[in-house]
Image (cartoon, rainbow, N blue to C red):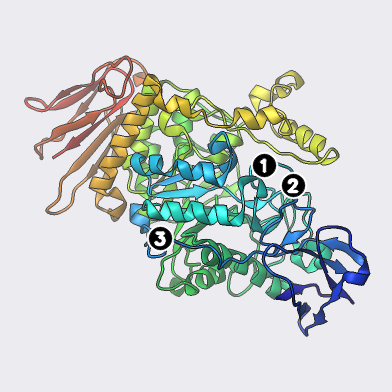
Amino acid sequence: MRFRVWAPGHGRVELVPGGGTETAGVAISLQREGDGHWSGHVPGIGAGTLYRFRLDGEGPFPDPASRFQPRGVHGPSQVVDPGAFRWENEGFRPHPLEELVLYELHVGTFTREGTFEAAAEKLPYLRELGITAVELMPLADFPGERNWGYDGVCLFAPARCYGSPDDLRAFVDRAHGLGLSVILDVVYNHLGPDGAFLGVYSPGYFSTRHATPWGAAINLDGPDSAPVRAFFIENARHWIHEYGIDGLRLDACHALFDDSPRHFLAELQDRVRGGVAPRPVLVIAEDSRNLTRMVQPESEGGWGLDAVWADDLHHQIRVALAGDRDGYYADFTGSLEDVARTIRDGWFYRGQFSKHGGGPRGTDPTPVPPRRFVVCVQNHDQVGNRALGERLHHQIDPAEFRAASTLLLLVPETPLLFMGQEWGASTPFQFFTDHNDTLGPLVTTGRRKEFAGFVAFADAAAQSRIPDPQGADTFRRSGLDWAEADDADHGRLLALYRELLRLRGMLQPGRLERGELDVSAVGGCLALRASRAGGESLLVVVRLGRTDEKVATGTVTFPVPTDARWRVRLTTEDEAFAAEPVPVRVHLEESPRIVFRRPGAVILLG
């Protein structure tokens, strides 16, 4: 077997087979290459062998490109044969962007067992729900036995607490057999604070010019940046090639600093797709800057990504319904007009001044088709980055949440659900870690200080209520309770989600282009209307409730347009969806109108 590692600046690099603290006598010297790499063919080593590298007599250290760390991120690496797995669904064709309904899940808290195998058992449920793509939160191995995933340090190795590499392959294969795509969240903007050994191989992995909130940025444009870029691009390619992953979600792209002539993101998406053509691969960015260039083709000066997370709609909805005002929520009004504009454009900020950011934010989204914006009313960030990890439906009335859910699932943008939201999970999703005894208390203290600027947590007593990230109970509280999905009250919301996703699959709003959907604020309601030549017209009328204090309570009347013969498809106050319904009065004959007596939504077809 051939081993190769980038370790410039070192005078001796040795492979140390086995899992113990072997002496230098059993180490195997690698040969220096001209570009800072060291390599060598080592006979007698195969799949399952444990090994590490020693650098100038120091170590031994895990392989930076280890495929598995069975004893944790500080332990030995293990040789893995990616070709040994027997795939049963190699002919699967991933869903195109216009058909995507994303379901974000954290493997460790999605099921009680917290494993790939247990998560795979829930895939038929997701298909029945109407999901078309599962989005896995980061899997790169991390220190300890529990983590959000954003402290990954062994970027090529699936976290051993979830299962083996073949267990992940089996999960992907099962998903493909059920017609589900699999998207993986990857983190290239920083490494976790414990067990990150890249720096001992070369300080060139980190920038001397750019910094992030987590420390030095990854070196994408300085001296020695070429092999660093290649390392991260190869990581992206390996998830696609070795695990059959259908797409990547790139975390916090605003922290990928690159002043090179060709941006790292443009090179990454090109290399990832080029290696598996004609099989389509999606590359989606998380980025708060509202940059059109991220999803424009390289030929037009863009970076060529498929889609971008667009959080402005989430922020508008949260301000409208839950009244949030701290932090970036200060930039949003939640008015019906602003919600309508956000849906029409894909994002709200297109160059206006941001009070939170202290300067202009965003670019003109007009050239971007609606489906290239990924929108949500919950995701791991917007729940887990709250002090108590509460979900939107924990803080608003069920009728309001049904209305917001209807809006989310029928907009032309690509909707994302966060695990459990479809049945109104009672469990929070809190920030959790399992760091060592030195780092752990610092994380706990830092987490509580982080919210000191929020009104609700301004004093020490309030901060003490913030769950301890290091506590095992914090992790356990964040696990879904699947028994709730069978409960009558939770089941009504689940029935609504199933029906809305069935309608989305039938009407396919993700195929709408700009100009084919009108979104307006009328009479205290939001109205979404789509018409296609030769196709069925759709009218979605949503009363959110708190967007205007004048209509927050009492009766709201929406005048139904009379240029089509409408019929009611559903209302969120139907008995199948509401435990104590307050029926919406829909009059479609003389003086057509919809009368809401509380927040809700009506879907009309014509």
Q: Earlier in the sequence, mark 2 or mark 3?
A: 3
Is residue 572 visible in the rendered image? The answer is: yes
Given contact means CB atoms under 8 Å apart, are the residues at marks 2 and 1 in contact?
yes
Under mark 2, the amino acid is Pro
- Residue at disc 3, secondary structure: loop
- Left or right position of 29 against 278: right
Q: CA distance from mark 1 to mark 3?
A: 31 Å
Assign a secondary structure to mark 2: loop
**Camera-side mark, 2 or 3:** 3
What is the x, y in percent for residue 539?
Answer: 21, 38
* Residue at mark 3: 89
What kind of residue is marked 3? Asn
Q: SS class of the residue under badge 1?
A: loop
Identify the residue at image location x=24%, y=18%: 583
Residue 548 x/y as whole percent? 38, 25
Q: Which residue is mark 2?
A: 143
Q: Residues within 10 Å of mark 2 (few under 14, many from 20)?
A: many
Q: Is residue 428 above or below residue 339?
A: above
